[in-house]
Amino acid sequence: MAMKEIPKAYTAKDHEDSLYKMWEESGAFAPSDDMSKEPYSIMMPPPNATGTLHLGHATMLAIEDILIRFKRMQGFAALYLPGTDHAAIATESVVIKKLQDGGMKNPREELGRDGLLDAIREFVENSKNTIRNQVRKMGTSCDWSRERYTFSDEMNVAVNELFKMMYEDGLIYRGGRIVSWDPKMQTTVADDELEYLEEKAPFYTFQYGPFQISTSRPETKFGDKYVVMHPDDKRYAKYKNGETFEAEWINGPVTATIIKDEAVDPEFGTGVMTITPWHDATDFEIAQRHKLDREQVIGLDGCLMEIAGEFAGMPIGKARPKIVEKLKEKGLLVNVDENYVHNVAVSYRGKGIMEPQIMKQWFVDVNKPAIDWKGKQLSIKEVLQDTVRSKMIKIVPDRFEKTYFHWIDNLRDWCISRQIWWGHRIPVWYKGDEMKVQADSPGTDWAQDEDTLDTWFSSQLWTFSTLGWPEKTPDLMRFTPSNCLETGYDILFFWVARMILGSTYALRKSGFSEEKSIPFKDVYLHGLIRDIHGKKMSKSRPETCIDPLDMIEKYGTDAIRLSLVIGSTAGNDMRLYEEKIAGYRNFVNKIWNGSRFVMMNLDGNDEIDPAALTRADKWILTRLNEIIKTVTDHLENYRLSEAGLTVYDFFWGEYCDWYLEISKVQKNPAVLKHVLKTTLTLMHPFMPFVTEAIWAELCPGTMLMTSNWPVINPDYAYFAESDEMGRIMDLIAGIRVLRAEAGVEAAKKIHAIIIAHEDTALVNDKADVIKRLANLGQLDIKENGEKIEKAFSTFVGDLEIYLPLADLIDFDAEIKRITKEITELENYFASLEKKLSNKAFVQNAPEEIIKKERTKMDETQQKMEKLKKQLLELGK
RNA sequence: GGACGAUUAGCUCAGCUGGUUAGAGCGCCACAUUGACAUUGUGGAGGUCGGUGGUUCGAGUCCACUAUCGUCCACCA
């Protein structure tokens, strides 16, 4: 038989590449052309076209691919659109560093704009290929024919179009604002691309006229001519707002003005500060409020300017101690706190220390009403809030909605211009004082804005520009909005919120309805992958890093996918270690061998004969129904881990350990095959390769990937699911109402009785419950009928009996004691039952022992019945 | 300063709207195994679910307070 050729252990390497090739060539990665099928789409968050795939990407791809394969099998026209991101600052700094490592001193100067762009382009093309192949390695079933790139010509058209629309709507404006300037990368950095590092720096206090002021940055203080204090600070009550005084300062005397502003914290330092509006965001705001002068002190190169007099041209780091020295000589240094700790802002990308500067930049206004939304003109901020608040967009897990709203509340205008070269260039042209906003040059003598756009400005268009916008292509009409955006929670603000912004604005403007203009319906946020100690994996500590590609090589893609998905929940970080992956590799192998065994026992007959089913067959078929239902339900609700675990447990613990064992004695090949096929289907989204490889043997000529997702077969409901618990729940619900209406004591007694009488017959027969209760007392239903009826209405239709409460009181303790005893017996009974339902025990244990256990069970049952009768007697 | 998350077996983690005796993997102990599988099977030990109080007939699950760890946001003159 052909089976003998199948190797004993599954070696992933021998199958994965050829299976992927088969899928790709079959065309099944593309969504079905059948327009009657409901569309389902996921836009892959594009990995940066700089490096290689890391575990974050692997997690993302695994989760998305599970969802898309599931939906595809369910019969949706499933689109999974892949792509890469040009990642402006990140890429440019990587390439510049490479060139510098290669000996080039200043690549920007030496290569010029076009030369550097060429170098970056070449680098990006190479790494794009690497990324593509790695995405394939993960088994990702995305439609490569629709691959997109955030810096393609088509994308550039979309970006320019959006810029123009927003400009014409007055949403984009140019203005002098304080921005974070990165002297290292020579560009601005957005607020949320900053991170703060703790730094210990000397904290100086200087005499400034009659005041003492403190600073850790004396080099900014040259132009300071305002002192600010809180209006309510009693210490300085004698000074009036606007009052001036003379003060000796670094380079001679200055005339200073007193300003009262609530931004000053009276508790901090001396409660008085001088301000440097050009180089501090808070100071800038104070200066705006009071219309104060602003002067630049530090140049864009990080060196002091003319205003610094003798210090001009010095880098700030060098100048600082010298300035302090001079002030000390002048007798103006009051004291130095050497243990002062404060935060410095650095770039999230390049780690350069920020220098706030006032610069002309392009901004997106987030407060101007400009979007026609549900009959009103709303601002970007308001639309961002409404989409989530009205549940048009659902965030999983929902606790991130709170974070999202908090972020929006604090949202300021978005600075979208960057002074780097790698990126979409701002489509604005200047000639003298004239300015035009358009993609192409208006003619000779016009010069284009030197700046490029923030990378997120193009990324925000990802969900719909990839489908052809601004053209109204069939894909755009069909697949927008996408169904799910899956990404890490760390870029909720960077990207997710911006996509909502871009999509709602652009698509509403293009005539789409509110429902069609959101970028996605669900947002699924996964956590970060950490090492076994819970630390972030970082390149600087390679021993903590797990490279997904190494793991694929060693354990196979299916094992990686499982280990990234099982045991992880939305929004929570997960630890990953090699042993875990090895564990799932074992499972993959188990599937292989279990299937091999099944195939050795098939007889070519696939028809299940209902008349020939053993108890075991019926059981496994019933269980299969339950598993289908559970797995489908979990997947629909993004509980991927639960779904995976369910099918894992079923296959290993029930199908292999139990049903296959029985099959060695008495087998039903048709059932064996049916259950295997169904289980393989359920497992396929999680572990596409091994399931497809087995399928090829099991059902030659067909492809599992395009098979139908299983549905429950009502014929296989041989064992009714126990709905007893459901009945009890109804009863309890009734008691809860009764408690509210008739009082706690009454409810407690009824509960005690029910516990005591909790046998199936009693719970099944509602009327019987009521009768028994009725025997216990003579509470008149005519008096309390309404309450009682309400209490039991969840499980009793008609109530025309008397309900007893009053006479129970004396038997309380006795009932309690017997109830407890019954509970103990029940526990014992259940443990016996468990033992007897253990297949291995039943199969292997000697007959006498099993008989003995059965006898014990019978005895226990009799005891329990006796006690229950007693309890009833007590009731009477 | 504000918010959020975590705390469950030796380790890493599940546990969906409160409900039969709280689960898995790894590790540990004992035994088994040349007929699918040592990447195995069977059995076992191991948990007062961080603490205190509350709601409830019933709490790992809900509420309040609290401890420890972690993350994010804001401020830091």
Image (cartoon, rainbow, N blue to C red):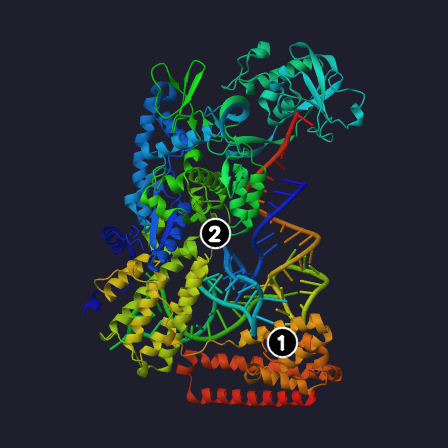
Report the residue marked by disc 1: A792
Compared with A351, A446 (above or below) is above
Tell me how many marks there are.
Answer: 2
Task: Give the numbered dot on residue A575.
Answer: 2
Compared with A191, A825 (above or below) is below
Give the image location of residue A572, x and y in percent.
Answer: 51, 51
Give the image location of residue A444, x and y in percent.
Answer: 34, 15
| Residue in the image at 32% along x and 56% along y | A36
- Label 1 in the same subunit as label 2: yes
Q: Quadrant of residue A205?
A: top right
Does B65 sit left or right of A691 as displayed? right
The quarter in which the N terminus of chain A is drawn is bottom left
Compared with A215, A604 (above or below) is below
Compared with A142, A691 (above or below) is below
Q: CA distance from mark 1 to mark 2?
A: 49 Å
Residue type at tag 1: Phe
Viewer-nearest residue: A481 or A758? A481
